[in-house]
Image: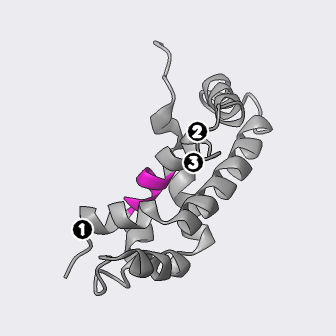
Protein backbone atom coordinates (compact mmCIF):
# COMPACT_ATOMS: atom_id res chain seq x y z
CA UNK A 1 0.00 0.00 0.00
CA UNK A 2 1.41 3.39 -0.95
CA UNK A 3 1.01 6.63 0.98
CA UNK A 4 -1.81 8.85 -0.27
CA UNK A 5 -2.74 12.52 -0.46
CA UNK A 6 -5.07 11.82 2.45
CA UNK A 7 -2.07 10.68 4.52
CA UNK A 8 -0.24 13.86 3.58
CA UNK A 9 -3.23 16.01 4.53
CA UNK A 10 -3.70 14.28 7.88
CA UNK A 11 0.00 14.62 8.69
CA UNK A 12 -0.04 18.33 7.84
CA UNK A 13 -2.95 18.89 10.25
CA UNK A 14 -1.00 17.60 13.26
CA UNK A 15 -0.05 20.51 15.55
CA UNK A 16 3.19 18.86 16.68
CA UNK A 17 4.24 18.31 13.08
CA UNK A 18 3.37 21.93 12.24
CA UNK A 19 5.46 23.07 15.19
CA UNK A 20 8.46 21.04 14.07
CA UNK A 21 8.14 22.32 10.51
CA UNK A 22 7.87 25.89 11.81
CA UNK A 23 10.96 25.52 13.99
CA UNK A 24 12.95 24.18 11.08
CA UNK A 25 11.57 26.79 8.68
CA UNK A 26 12.71 29.62 10.96
CA UNK A 27 16.11 27.97 11.35
CA UNK A 28 16.42 27.65 7.58
CA UNK A 29 15.46 31.32 7.15
CA UNK A 30 18.35 32.27 9.43
CA UNK A 31 20.68 30.22 7.22
CA UNK A 32 19.33 31.95 4.12
CA UNK A 33 19.91 35.34 5.72
CA UNK A 34 23.59 34.62 6.15
CA UNK A 35 24.29 32.52 3.06
CA UNK A 36 25.81 35.38 1.08
CA UNK A 37 25.59 36.72 -2.44
CA UNK A 38 27.34 33.75 -4.05
CA UNK A 39 24.11 31.73 -3.75
CA UNK A 40 21.84 31.96 -6.78
CA UNK A 41 18.82 34.20 -6.15
CA UNK A 42 20.10 35.18 -2.71
CA UNK A 43 18.28 38.54 -2.82
CA UNK A 44 14.93 36.83 -3.51
CA UNK A 45 15.59 34.08 -0.99
CA UNK A 46 16.56 36.59 1.70
CA UNK A 47 13.47 38.70 1.01
CA UNK A 48 11.25 35.64 1.33
CA UNK A 49 12.96 34.77 4.63
CA UNK A 50 12.22 38.29 5.90
CA UNK A 51 8.59 37.90 4.78
CA UNK A 52 8.35 34.68 6.79
CA UNK A 53 9.82 36.31 9.90
CA UNK A 54 7.52 39.35 9.59
CA UNK A 55 4.31 37.50 8.71
CA UNK A 56 1.22 38.49 10.65
CA UNK A 57 0.11 35.60 12.82
CA UNK A 58 -3.28 34.03 12.17
CA UNK A 59 -6.10 33.97 14.74
CA UNK A 60 -4.51 30.95 16.43
CA UNK A 61 -1.18 32.77 16.79
CA UNK A 62 0.52 30.68 14.10
CA UNK A 63 2.69 32.00 11.29
CA UNK A 64 0.80 31.28 8.04
CA UNK A 65 4.01 30.17 6.33
CA UNK A 66 4.36 27.48 8.97
CA UNK A 67 0.99 26.07 7.92
CA UNK A 68 1.80 26.41 4.22
CA UNK A 69 5.15 24.66 4.56
CA UNK A 70 3.58 21.97 6.76
CA UNK A 71 1.45 20.95 3.80
CA UNK A 72 4.28 20.96 1.29
CA UNK A 73 6.68 19.16 3.66
CA UNK A 74 3.98 16.56 4.42
CA UNK A 75 3.78 15.89 0.67
CA UNK A 76 7.53 15.17 0.45
CA UNK A 77 7.91 11.48 -0.40
CA UNK A 78 10.65 10.83 2.18
CA UNK A 79 8.73 12.59 4.96
CA UNK A 80 5.52 10.79 4.04
CA UNK A 81 7.34 7.47 3.89
CA UNK A 82 8.64 8.05 7.43
CA UNK A 83 5.18 8.95 8.72
CA UNK A 84 3.43 5.97 7.10
CA UNK A 85 6.25 3.46 7.67
CA UNK A 86 6.84 3.11 3.96
CA UNK A 87 3.16 3.35 3.12
CA UNK A 88 2.17 0.41 5.35
CA UNK A 89 0.27 2.41 7.98
CA UNK A 90 -2.32 4.84 6.60
CA UNK A 91 -2.93 8.03 8.57
CA UNK A 92 -6.67 8.05 9.11
CA UNK A 93 -7.07 9.66 12.53
CA UNK A 94 -5.46 12.50 14.50
CA UNK A 95 -3.87 9.90 16.80
CA UNK A 96 -2.23 8.18 13.82
CA UNK A 97 -1.10 11.59 12.54
CA UNK A 98 0.56 12.27 15.89
CA UNK A 99 2.27 8.88 15.81
CA UNK A 100 3.31 9.33 12.17
CA UNK A 101 4.65 12.81 12.84
CA UNK A 102 6.86 11.44 15.59
CA UNK A 103 8.39 9.00 13.09
CA UNK A 104 9.52 11.76 10.72
CA UNK A 105 13.15 12.66 11.26
CA UNK A 106 14.29 16.24 11.71
CA UNK A 107 16.77 15.70 8.89
CA UNK A 108 13.98 14.75 6.49
CA UNK A 109 11.97 17.83 7.45
CA UNK A 110 15.07 19.99 6.95
CA UNK A 111 15.82 18.44 3.58
CA UNK A 112 12.24 18.96 2.41
CA UNK A 113 12.27 22.64 3.39
CA UNK A 114 15.64 23.22 1.73
CA UNK A 115 14.48 21.48 -1.44
CA UNK A 116 11.19 23.37 -1.59
CA UNK A 117 12.26 26.85 -0.49
CA UNK A 118 12.99 28.24 -3.96
CA UNK A 119 9.58 27.05 -5.17
CA UNK A 120 8.11 29.88 -3.11
CA UNK A 121 10.21 32.72 -4.52
CA UNK A 122 9.81 34.69 -7.70
CA UNK A 123 12.80 34.11 -9.96
CA UNK A 124 13.63 37.38 -11.75
CA UNK A 125 13.78 37.50 -15.53
CA UNK A 126 17.37 36.97 -16.66
Quadrant containing the N terminus is bottom left
Residue in the image at 75% along x and 39% along y: 35
Can you give x and y, in whole percent of width and height, for residue 108 in the image?
Answer: 54, 68
- Write down the residue under mark 2: 58
Q: Are marks 2 and 3 in contact (CB under 8 Å)?
A: no
How many C-alpha atoms fall within 10 Å of the one at disc 3: few (<14), some, or many (≥20)? many
- Write down the residue under mark 1: 4
What range is drawn magenta here?
Answer: 70-76
Q: State the residue in front, 59 or 6.
A: 59
Q: Which of pointers 1 and 2 indicates the residue nearer the eye?
A: 2
- Write down the residue under mark 3: 66
How many angstroms separate mark 1 from mark 2 (CA)? 28 Å
How many C-alpha atoms fall within 10 Å of the one at disc 1: few (<14), some, or many (≥20)? some
Q: State the residue in front, 98 or 35.
A: 98
- Secondary structure of the residue carrying tag 3 is helix
As for residue 111 lying within the magenta part, the answer is no
Specify how the rendered protein is coloured: one colour
Taking the image as drawn, is residue 34 in sight? yes
How many angstroms separate mark 3 from mark 1 (CA)? 22 Å
Q: Earlier in the sequence, mark 3 or mark 1?
A: 1
How many angstroms separate mark 2 from mark 3 (CA)? 11 Å
Q: Is residue 124 shown left or right of residue 51?
A: left
- Secondary structure of the residue carrying tag 1 is loop
Q: Is residue 1 shown left or right of residue 73?
A: left
How many C-alpha atoms fall within 10 Å of the one at disc 2: few (<14), some, or many (≥20)? few
Q: Earlier in the sequence, mark 2 or mark 3?
A: 2
Amino acid sequence: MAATFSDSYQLAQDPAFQGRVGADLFTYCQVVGSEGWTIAFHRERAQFAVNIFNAILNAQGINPYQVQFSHSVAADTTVLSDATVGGTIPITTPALALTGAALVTDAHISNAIAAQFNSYIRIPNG
